Image (cartoon, rainbow, N blue to C red):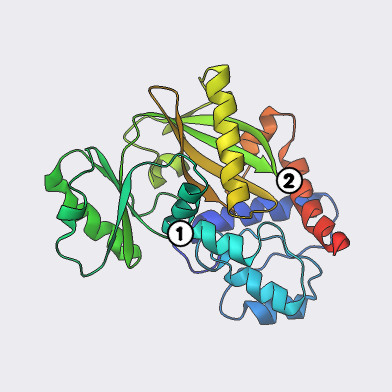
Amino acid sequence: MGGTSSEREISLRSGVAIYNVFKERGYNSVSIDAGKDVADDIKREKINVAFIALHGGWGENGAIQGLLEVMGIPYTGSGILASALAMDKIVSRRIFEQQGLNVPRYVVIERGISDFRSQISDLRLPLVIKPSSEGSSIGVNIINKMEELEEAVGNAFRYGEKVIIEEFIDGKEIHVGILDNKALGAIEVRPKKGFYSYEAKYTPGFTDYIYPPALSNKEYRDSLELALKGHIALGCDGATRVDLKVNREGIPYILEVNTLPGMTATSLLPKIAQGVGIGFNELVEKILELALKKVREV
């Protein structure tokens, strides 16, 4: 948990919540704040299996997974390739397109290209501007007029060399929980101010959560099906959270797959699991069991 990414504080919250479950249940467990000497820490603690709660950066781009594989230590969640694919919003989106899954209309711009306005001439306002490899809505802005474009793009470029500019899908924001290649259910988020930003996600009272979401039966089924297809398309394992928008006509669009979703008792995946009768402690143990199951199947 922890690490050095922009999601460090959220990662620490998830890690502490998970560690407390293991401590309460009597597991022989240790918490590791991942720094550059994380390999030494893992070796010193004689880890048998790693529960990854390392949001962003090394935790979600396949790096920590690669280290653990080299060390011969099983771990929770998706493997190296699926983690890297999901972390890169551009690559994952192209895979979704290849699989025929609905995605918002978008363009990709790279740092140093000065005439990017011509590339987005076919896109309709409002527009969403986001970094290609950040989580927790960090660096994301929604603009309603072109005069806001330069500042929003500059903000997104603070977090990487490529930026996605996409059409805003007017509709409901739906998050689907996946566990063991099955869609558990979905939850709707309604920020009280603007969009589901970092502030809205992590400040109590800034967002309303609707479970189950206010969708028709068909819209709900279509959303679960789309989310599961996205999870499978990237080759994900364990528990993921898939972010969707359902437009005014009831058509779902996939935005991204989160291979290491937040794991505090109030995070979205635990909320979805709770809705189908899986408490937080049980969810944590199920994720651990899936990692051990992979080892037994080898």
* Residue at x-position 63% and y-position 77%: 38
Q: Mark 2 touching mark 1, by CB under 8 A?
A: no
Q: Residue at x 16, y 47 (%)?
A: 148
Task: Tell me residue 298's x, y (percent).
Answer: 85, 65
Report the side of 268 relative to 182 (left or right).
Answer: left
Mark 2 or mark 1: name the one nearer the start of the chain. 1
Position of the N terminus by quadrant:
bottom right
**Res 135 seen here:** no
Q: Amino acid at mark 1?
A: Val
Is the residue marked by circle 1 packed among few (<14), some (14-19), or many (20+) residues within 10 Å? Answer: some
Q: Position of residue 142 (x, y in %)?
A: 27, 42
Q: Is residue 273 above or below residue 66?
A: above
**Is residue 256 shown left or right of residue 72?**
left
Q: Which residue is mark 1?
A: 91
- Location of residue 154 with respect to 147 vertically, above or below: below
Q: Nearer the viewer, residue 258 or 43?
A: 258
Helix, strand or loop status at disc 2? loop
Give the amino acid at mark 2: Asp
Quadrant of residue 199 in the image?
top left
- Name the residue rendered at 33%, 32% in the picture: 193
Q: Position of residue 17 (x, y in %)?
A: 66, 50
| Mark 2 surroundings within 10 Å by alpha-carbon count, few (fewer than 14), some (14 through 19), many (20 or more) | some
Number of marks present in the image shown: 2
Compute the Cα span from label 2 to label 1: 23 Å
Is 293 situated left or right of 92 in this image? Answer: right
For image coordinates 57% across by 64% down, the residue present is: 59
Mark number, residue 180: 2
Q: Residue 256: horizontal and vertical position, in percent? A: 48, 47
